[in-house]
Amino acid sequence: MKQDFQNKIIWLTGASSGIGEALAYEFCQRGARLILSARRAAELERVRAQCVDPTRVKILPLDAADLENIPEKGKQARALFGTLDILVNNAGIAQRGRVVETEMLALQRVFQVNFFGAVALTKAVLPEMLERRAGHIVVVSSLTGKLPVPKHAAYCASKHALQGYFNSLRAEVARQGVKVTLLLPGFVQSEISKNSLDERGNPRGKAFAVRRAMRADVAARKMANAIARGKEQYEFGGIERFAVPLYAFTPRLYSYAVKRIKT
């Protein structure tokens, strides 16, 4: 097993299930010291217990939508190990519904978690990274951050916002020792669809089927490799990844195709 994260201190959000849980196991196996955050403390404890070395893992419950409390959480995170090498913004929520039927509350909730939560967490740790001239900001976005998808407008918009914000941040801090990596997975097996919001902003409680989704542990390994290599952006997935160049070079053809997809 690679040890390319040996003794690196990583703060990982959205760590209680899915991609976040798989990343926790991957980072720990590769020698990292971890701070795991999510809303469900009991699930975080479960994940910690299953890590290869639980003594190297700390728990810091966090609601990414609670923006006012995030600066204090940043201080607490740094205090756990004394510093922070890598922040992985993985907390996220999905929403499904036609635009005309989706209430503003649902849209606001998606942006609060997916975009503003990641921004607030980044701003909570960035000053110290800049002072040390060392650090790595990682954002788990999605291929939908580069694509329009019917009935997923809120989710797509929040991921597009991440692309614009963190690509801009990278340009700002590139000469100050801080790296920024955007990860854009395609379909991955996780609880995100089950926990997605309906048009009113309430939990849907029912997953929608996705064929040939990648296993979370496979996705986590690919993501960890991209982070270790310091990639600026890493897009991956199954056949769905070809939708990105299709949309970029032949948007009319993509539009024609996506209108005929049952969503």
Image (tube, grey):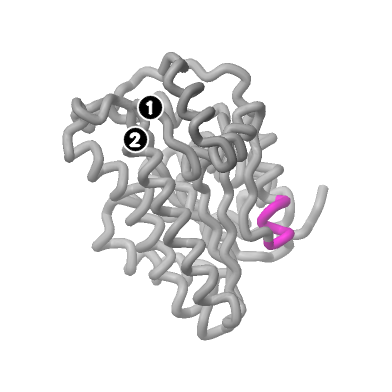
For the point 76% across and 59% down, the residue is: 4
Is 247 on the left or on the right of 32, as rendered?
left
Work out which quarter of the rendered image holds the C terminus and state it. top left
Q: Position of residue 239 (x, y in %)?
A: 65, 27
Q: Position of residue 261 (x, y in %)?
A: 46, 17
Find residue 153 and name its label: 2
Q: Secondary structure at mark 2?
A: helix
What amino acid type should be assigned to the residue bearing mark 2?
Answer: Ala
Find residue 150 and name its label: 1
Q: Kindly report the distance in space between the C-alpha atoms of the residues bearing marks 1 and 2.
A: 6 Å
Q: Is residue 122 above or below residue 105?
A: below
For the point 42% across and 26% down, the residue is: 193
> Label 1: how many residues lie within 10 Å, few (<14), some (14-19) or many (20+)?
some
The residue lying toward the viewer, choosing from 260 and 176, is 260
Q: Residue 196 is drawn in which quadrant? A: top left
Q: Secondary structure at mark 1?
A: loop
Q: Is residue 77 above or below residue 1?
A: below
Q: Position of residue 94 (x, y in %)?
A: 37, 34
What amino acid type should be assigned to the residue bearing mark 1?
Answer: Pro
**Magenta residues?**
225-230
The residue lying toward the viewer, choosing from 207 and 212, is 212
Q: Position of residue 247 (x, y in %)?
A: 54, 37
Q: Main secondary structure of the magenta part?
A: helix
For the point 42% across and 39% down, the residue is: 42
Q: How many marks?
A: 2
